[in-house]
Image (cartoon, rainbow, N blue to C red):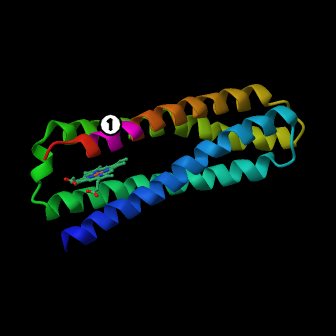
């Protein structure tokens, strides 16, 4: 595979990751407002947010695969640099946050929404899940910006 194609695959993966991640981030405020106002749009918004989260996960997996492919095409030359190790550490931390913070919070949303539709007041569960997801989005954004800064500023 040519270097140009390998870079394109990595950047295409970045587009998928960014689309899901930024989309999910933008969905957060409408979701919180829908919970507080009791909007009938809430289930639809939550389902759209879940789909965006899946897109972000797929993008993140593609980042890893295309990054390994790019490393192979470049004879692993960048993997000797500290900035690449820092980037991979942040990438791994993003997965820790995704599985440790976002996934448990998201898993509570569906059942809480279902119970709410049956008349139960699940506002507290929904609010706490959404606030955890808000924290997750903020931390991921910091990590994402840090990775891009490392890639741009990394010495070669
Ligand atoms: C959220 C995760 C990631 C982001 C945002 C990201 C972003 C980027 C960007 C913007 C580039 C520059 C592409 C170019 O040269 O035009 C790049 C290069 C690269 N990435 Fe990633 N990447 C991520 C994860 C990974 C992972 C997990 C690996 C490896 C396992 C990896 C390996 C590489 C390599 C080898 C390069 C080439 C470096 C160079 O241009 O000298 N990346 N990455």
The residue that disc 1 covers is: 90
Q: Which residues are magenta?
A: 145-150
In the rendered image, residue 105, in percent from the top left (x then y), is placed at 59, 35
| Relative vertical location of residue 7 with respect to residue 134 in this rendering, above or below | below
Q: Nearer the viewer, residue 148 or 119?
A: 148
Q: Measuring 61% from the left and 40% from the top, which residue is drawn there? A: 106
Residue 50 shows in this picture = yes
**Is residue 149 in the magenta section?**
yes
Disc 1 crowd, CA 10 A, few/some/many (<14, 14-19, 20+): some
Ligand 1: does it lie within 8 Å of the C-beta at label 1? yes
Majority SS type along the magenta span: helix
Q: Measuring 82% from the left and 49% from the top, which residue is drawn there? A: 41
**Is residue 3 in the magenta section?**
no
In the rendered image, residue 112, in percent from the top left (x then y), is placed at 74, 37
Location of residue 29 (image quadrant)? top right
Q: Measuring 59% from the left and 42% from the top, which residue is drawn there? A: 25
Residue 118 horizontal side relative to residue 94, left or right: right
In the rendered image, residue 98, in percent from the top left (x then y), is placed at 47, 39
């Amino acid at each position: 595979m040519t270097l140009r194609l390998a870079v394109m695959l990595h950047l295409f993966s970045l587009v998928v990751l960014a689309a899901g991640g930024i989309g999910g981030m933008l969905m957060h405020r409408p979701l919180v407002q829908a919970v507080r106002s009791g909007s009938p749009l809430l289930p639809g918004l939550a389902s759209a947010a879940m789909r965006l989260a899946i897109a972000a996960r797929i993008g993140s997996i593609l980042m890893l695969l295309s990054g390994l492919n790019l490393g192979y095409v470049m004879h692993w030359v960048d993997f000797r640099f500290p900035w690449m190790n820092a980037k991979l550490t942040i990438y791994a931390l993003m997965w820790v946050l995704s599985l440790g913070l976002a996934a448990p919070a998201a898993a509570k949303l569906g059942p809480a929404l279902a119970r709410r539709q049956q008349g139960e007041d699940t506002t507290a569960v929904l609010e706490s899940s959404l606030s955890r997801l808000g924290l997750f989005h903020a931390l991921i954004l910091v990590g994402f910006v840090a990775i891009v800064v490392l890639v741009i500023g990394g010495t070669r």
